[in-house]
């Protein structure tokens, strides 16, 4: 996969990308990342990339010229393609696991990270997706882009050590992940559930599914509205929601 990132703060992006799973993907050659400082493409004599909005209002907007020219640079480096272009914008569609899975199918992604009060609307003619990390505002798009990149890259083939790890993640199945334990069996009086020590994988799978449903019901019941539930799942939920007599 190829990823391009357009930003005013390259170090905010370059340094974290070379750590952990994403860094290993780069080292292995499975991921190629280029970071472009679009201030370098400003034709303003002072290198400005923002200006006051027409009609008045608070804050400054990113002007189109530097980003349009930076995108031309990306094209020139990628056989005249920018791939799928993602504008990191608090007004965009909220990022989720399904979107990460969709992004992971692409050969080339380009993220545009904003700053200041927002974008000149004409910049949006360059993009395929406007995406938000959530219902809050942060200083710029870099941290949000890094989160989306991390969530996407870990889904690429052979990136995680265990191919089943991503399958079992919270949200991948539509539910929150079940509780997990490792050694020691007894840590300061806190014991691993006996079912996990039984060796009965059928019973273990049943326990994990029940715990996943229980956790989702308690913390994120909204996920149950769209999760693919079996008749057995629905029966478990009915039992969980029935008060003890």
Image (spheres, helix red, strand yellow):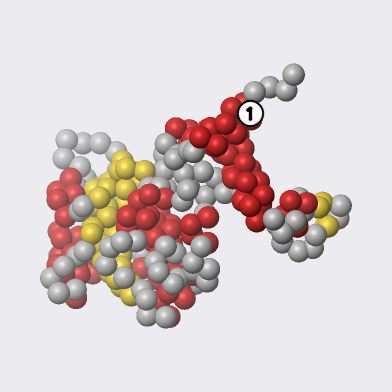
Note whether 135 is above or below 194 in the view shown: above
Locate residue 135, reporting x and y percent.
41, 39
Please give the name of the residue rendered at 20% of the width and 53% of the height, measured from the top-left corner: 127
Note whether 28 is above or below 118 in the view shown: below
Note whether 8 is above or below 94 in the view shown: below
Please give the name of the residue rendered at 68% of the width and 22% of the height, measured from the top-left corner: 243
In the displayed structure, does residue 168 sit left or right of residue 34? Answer: right
Closer to us: 88 or 151:
151
State the residue lying farthest toward the bottom.
Answer: 28
State the residue lying farthest toward the right.
Answer: 189
State the residue lying farthest toward the top.
Answer: 245
Task: Give the residue number, with chain letter if any, for mark 1.
Answer: 239
Q: Quadrant of residue 78?
A: bottom left
Please give the name of the residue rendered at 74% of the width and 19% of the height, measured from the top-left corner: 245
Locate residue 84, reporting x and y percent.
23, 59
In the displayed structure, does residue 134 sit left or right of residue 4? Answer: right
Locate residue 65, reporting x and y percent.
15, 59
Closer to us: 75 or 28:
28
Locate residue 224, reporting x and y percent.
48, 35
Q: Is residue 11 visible?
A: no
Note whether 182 is above or below 34 in the view shown: above
Closer to us: 240 or 21:
240
SS under mark 1: helix
Q: Quadrant of residue 5?
A: bottom left
In the displayed structure, does residue 117 sit left or right of residue 18? Answer: left
The quadrant of the image that shows the N terminus is bottom left
């Amino acid at each position: 996969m190829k990823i391009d990132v357009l930003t005013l703060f390259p170090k905010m992006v370059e340094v974290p990308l070379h750590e952990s799973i994403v860094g290993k993907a780069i080292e292995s050659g499975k991921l190629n990342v280029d970071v472009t400082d679009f201030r370098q493409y400003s034709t303003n004599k002072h290198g400005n990339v923002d200006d006051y909005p027409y009609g008045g209002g608070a804050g400054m907007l990113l002007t189109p010229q530097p980003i349009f020219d930076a995108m031309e640079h990306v094209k020139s480096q990628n056989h005249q393609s920018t791939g799928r272009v993602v504008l990191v914008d608090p007004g965009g569609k909220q990022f989720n696991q399904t979107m990460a899975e969709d992004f992971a199918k692409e050969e080339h992604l380009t993220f545009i990270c904003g700053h200041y009060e927002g974008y000149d609307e004409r910049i949006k003619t360059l993009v395929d997706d406007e995406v938000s990390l959530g219902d809050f505002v942060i200083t710029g798009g870099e941290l949000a882009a890094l989160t989306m990149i991390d969530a996407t890259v870990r889904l690429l083939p052979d990136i995680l050590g265990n191919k089943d790890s991503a399958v079992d993640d919270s949200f991948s199945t539509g539910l929150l992940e079940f509780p997990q334990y490792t050694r020691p069996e007894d840590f300061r009086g806190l014991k691993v559930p006996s079912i996990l020590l039984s060796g009965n994988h059928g019973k273990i799978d049943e326990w994990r599914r029940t715990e996943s449903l229980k956790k989702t019901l308690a913390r994120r019941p909204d996920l149950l509205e769209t999760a693919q539930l079996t008749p057995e799942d629905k029966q478990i939920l009915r039992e969980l929601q029935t008060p003890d007599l």
